[in-house]
Image: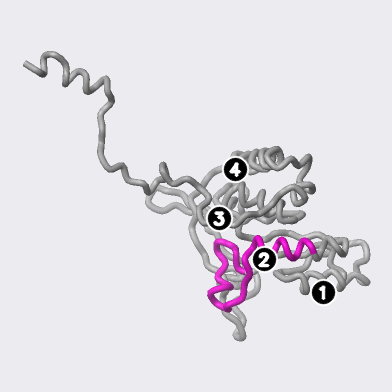
């Protein structure tokens, strides 16, 4: 490929190990796409048993790529701005997003209406839907490795992008990085069993209902004692 297109930027993937990252770069790739199975509509790990934890894959592949002058893209696994920050902290040069942007106007998914609510159709690129649409169907020798879902319609993506960028800027200040490329030199990853305080989570039930003090005063005042 490199001999045929000497001035073209070549991206290849997807891989999850340093050996395959090195092999692709030696073969002429400028950018290596990292990630097997972490996507929200990907079923590769379930269908094939093949996969790798995304953060570990990014750490390993980034180290290999950067040692050879290449770059990597972290493809899949991000559910919030913090996940994007972790990907850059692990050494990713770029981060691909699918599910986080799937419900917006700018996504290519079809806008549909059901019961008064609007949704966007979102499918994995190894899914039955994608292969029928882009490759003429699922080949006889393989199976679908993705699913098709409906995500709530969210309008323009401006607010989501601002939220992601805000999280990234704040992350840089927390770890002392002047720019994104410096994040991987500033962060230390620690394994945790619980990331958030669940006290006020949505599934936390209030054991007993109480009335505001002002409302109780009207009922429990002097007249109530008579």
Is residue 54 on the magenta stretch? yes
- Mark closer to the chain start, 4 or 2: 2
Q: Is 194 rendered above or below residue 208?
A: below
The circle on residue 77 is none
Q: Where does residue 189 sit, x and y in percent of width and height?
A: 66, 54
- Mark closer to the chain start, 4 or 3: 4
Mark 4 crowd level (few <14, some 14–19, many ≥20, 10 Å Cα): some
- Mark closer to the chain start, 1 or 3: 1
Question: Mark 4–mark 3 contact, CB under 8 Å?
Answer: no
**Marks 1/3: CA–CA distance:** 33 Å
Q: Locate the C terminus and report the quarter of the image it occupies.
A: top left
Q: Where does residue 20 sit, x and y in percent of width and height?
A: 77, 73
- Mark closer to the chain start, 4 or 1: 1
| SS of the residue under disc 2 | loop
Location of mark 1 (residue): 23
Q: Locate the N terminus and report the quarter of the image it occupies.
A: bottom right
**Marks 4/3: CA–CA distance:** 27 Å
- Mark closer to the chain start, 3 or 2: 2
- Mark closer to the chain start, 2 or 1: 1
In the image, 191 versus 9, the foreground residue is 191
Q: Residue at x 11, y 14 (%)?
A: 223
| SS of the residue under disc 3 | loop
Q: Nearer the viewer, mark 4 or mark 1?
A: 1
Location of mark 4 (residue): 160
**Marks 4/1: CA–CA distance:** 36 Å
Task: Provide the residue span drawn in magenta.
Answer: 37-63
| SS of the residue under disc 1 | helix
Mark 1 crowd level (few <14, some 14–19, many ≥20, 10 Å Cα): few
Location of mark 3 (residue): 192
Q: Where does residue 157 sit, x and y in percent of width and height?
A: 60, 43
Q: Residue at x 60, y 85 (%)?
A: 140
């Amino acid at each position: 490929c490199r001999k045929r297109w000497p001035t073209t930027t070549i991206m290849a993937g997807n891989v999850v190990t340093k050996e395959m990252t090195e092999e692709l770069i030696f073969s002429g790739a400028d950018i290596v796409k990292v990630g097997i199975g972490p996507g929200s509509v990907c079923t590769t790990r379930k269908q094939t048993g093949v996969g790798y934890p995304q953060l570990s894959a990014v750490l390993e592949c980034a180290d290999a790529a950067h040692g050879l002058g290449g770059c990597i893209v972290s493809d899949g696994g991000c559910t919030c701005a913090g996940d994007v920050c972790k990907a850059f902290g692990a050494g990713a040069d770029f981060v691909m997003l699918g599910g986080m942007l799937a419900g917006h106007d700018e996504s290519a998914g079809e806008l549909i209406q059901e019961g008064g609510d609007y949704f966007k159709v979102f499918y994995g690129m190894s899914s039955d839907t994608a292969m029928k649409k882009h490759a003429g169907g699922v080949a006889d020798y393989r199976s679908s490795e993705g699913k098709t879902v409906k995500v709530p319609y969210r309008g323009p993506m401006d607010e989501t992008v601002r939220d992601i960028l805000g999280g990234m800027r704040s992350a840089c200040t927390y770890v002392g990085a002047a720019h994104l490329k410096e994040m991987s030199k500033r962060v230390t990853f620690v394994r945790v069993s619980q990331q958030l305080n669940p006290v006020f989570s949505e599934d936390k039930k209030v054991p007993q209902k109480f009335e505001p003090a002002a409302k109780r005063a009207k009922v429990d005042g002097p007249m109530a004692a008579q």
